[in-house]
Amino acid sequence: MQLEAYLKNANYFSLGHLPTESLHPDTRKLSDEVEAHLPGAIATVQQIDLAAIQVVKEALPLIRDLSEAIESTLTSGGRVFLSGCGATGRLALTLESLFRSLHADNARKDQIQALMAGGDFALVKSVENFEDYPEYGERHLHDLGFQEGDLLIAITEGGETPYVIGTVSGALQHSSLKPWFVFCNPSELLVQTVERSRAVIENARVRSLCLPVGPMALSGSTRLQAATAQMLAVG
């Protein structure tokens, strides 16, 4: 029965065609390069990092729009919610923690709220399956009291995580402020190949911030260039 269910929904989770899940051409032999010439291997990874930072620089006009939306929400007394999964969930919780540390002695400390697939427990130990259900994200946002005047920033490295997309759906139901959808694969590719992503990216009520950093230096390790670019953009 489980096998039949998997085969029926396999395409839903088939993401190997996305750049962030692909092999980086410059690091295919990185392990050999580390042994042969460590400084050269480090320089290779540094160049990939610098390329990711350049992507962020090119997105500065949109990042300024995001910054203004955050400032306007906080000034108006609303809250900013950050949703993520895995590396982006930890990114969201890190930003909340940093904000709280800066405003520990005043009422503003609760104006940044982070939510992560699997909850706080997932911060220290992987919690499987939660990220695969958009309804979990929608319910999580609702349980935290998201309401009119609040702003959501939904962060997903691939642009296809069901949980994170679910938080966008929830935000659209409860606040007139346009949620932001932050991701690291090309918009055109996601629209063409991932239906759930297309529904968000083409929604006029959602602001998209695409940071197409390409493949990770270590294949699939999105805590590297993708999370770094998103931390710079959102943080």
Image (cartoon, grey):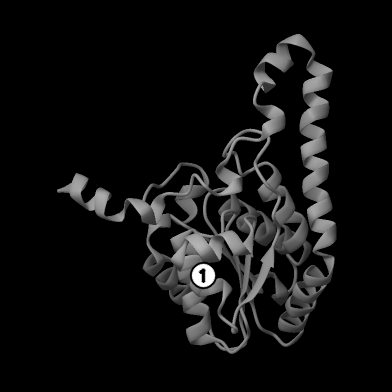
Q: Position of residue 66 (x, y in %)?
A: 75, 73
Q: Is 81 left or right of 30, judged from the image as shown?
A: left
Residue at 20% x, 45% y is 3
x and y percent of residue 53 in the render?
81, 50
For residue 101, what is the image quadrant? bottom right
Q: Which residue lies at the image location 66% right of the left edge and 35% below the top edge?
A: 24
Q: Is residue 111 left or right of residue 120?
A: right
The residue at which mark 1 appears reads as 198
Depth order, front residue of 69/49: 49
Can residue 155 be seen? no
> In the picture provided, is 164 more to the left or to the right than 41?
left
Q: Is residue 234 above or below residue 123?
A: below
Q: Position of residue 214 (x, y in %)?
A: 68, 47
Please say whether residue 71 is visible from this viewpoint: yes
Vertical position of residue 15 compared to residue 134: above or below = above
Q: Does 108 sit above or below residue 85?
A: below
The residue nearer to you, when weighing 186 against 53, is: 186
Q: Position of residue 37 (x, y in %)?
A: 79, 13
Front one among 7 and 62: 7
Instruction: Write the residue at 62% across / 82% down.
Output: 178
Q: Amino acid at mark 1?
A: Arg
Work out which quarter of the rendered image holds the C terminus and state it: bottom right
The residue that appears at 63% across and 85% down in the rendered structure is 177
Q: Nearer the viewer, residue 98 or 46?
A: 46
